[in-house]
Image: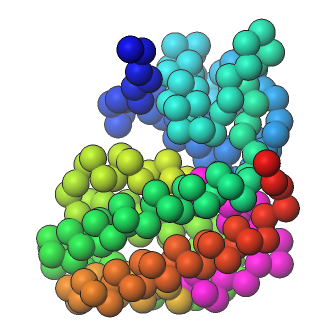
Amino acid sequence: MNMKKQPVLSPHSHAERAYQLLEEKLVTLALPPGSMVSEGDLIEMTGYGRTPVREAIQRLAFQEFFHVIPRRGLMVTDVTRSNMLHILEARKPLERLIIYRASLNAKDAQRGDLAAIARGLSITHDRFEEFLKLDHKLDELLDTCAGNPFASSAVSPLRGHCRRLLFFHRQGMQLTDSISANSKMARLVARREFRGAKKASDGRIAVLERVVSNVGRTD
């Protein structure tokens, strides 16, 4: 039985850096949904060599950001309603687990950092890209607090797809509900209030579900 395995990369490797750069290009739509690119295009875009870029491509294809089309190249996956519903269905229980462990395990300094992110989020209403950066920073901090690398590894690409969804709908999008859910969740984790934090996490997913209802692309 031939089973695909997600590549495991050193956090400081060229392949990991190439992955981070390409994931950012995908999330921010610099690599637009539905577009075709070649391995050579991505080598030029990242500045890394063929081997690390190929490893990054394999990882992103495994995470459903790229479709490999033989003899044609790579197609950036579309943002579709059905895919996003599957992603949110998978993400919700993983986030609950991370929130639970983070609420129990976060150290005092980390709780201070969570409160600081909550304050930062509260003033990002007109700054979408700053909101997205803090959203990403919050996820990374929660993962560190939770201390479960398997859950973090599983949820990371799902979060990337969700950030891409938000970027896809950024024009005219009101961030109020997302900011409220994220900042409330961060504050509650900082106070060890797991039940309230879990509800806020579910609220965060609910905001994304409402965004999905407006996705223009369909299967």
Does 175 lie within the magenta span?
A: yes
Residue 163 in sight: no
Figure label count = 0
Does 177 lie within the magenta span?
A: yes
> What residue range appears in magenta?
161-179
Q: Is residue 211 above or below residue 56?
A: below
Q: Is residue 64 above or below residue 181?
A: above
Decide if residue 104 is on the left or right side of residue 56: left
Instruction: Classify the position of the N terminus by image quarter.
Output: top left
Magenta segment, prevailing SS (helix, strand or loop): helix
Quadrant of the rendered image containing residue 54: top right
**Residue lying at 36% horizontally and 29% vertically, measured from the top left:** 9
- Colour style of the rendered protein structure: rainbow
Decide if residue 178 is on the left or right side of residue 181: right
Residue 105 in sight: yes
Q: Is residue 63 above or below residue 204?
A: above
How far across and how far down the image is residue 131, in percent?
59, 73
**Residue lying at 44% horizontally and 23% vertically, measured from the top left:** 4
**Residue lying at 63% horizontally and 57% vertically, measured from the top left:** 84
**Residue lying at 25% horizontally and 83% vertically, measured from the top left:** 194
**In the image shown, does 89 or 58 lie closer to the viewer?**
89
How far across and how far down the image is residue 67, in percent?
68, 29
**In the image, farthest residue toward the front:** 1
How far across and how far down the image is residue 218, in percent?
81, 54
How far across and how far down the image is residue 20, in percent?
52, 41
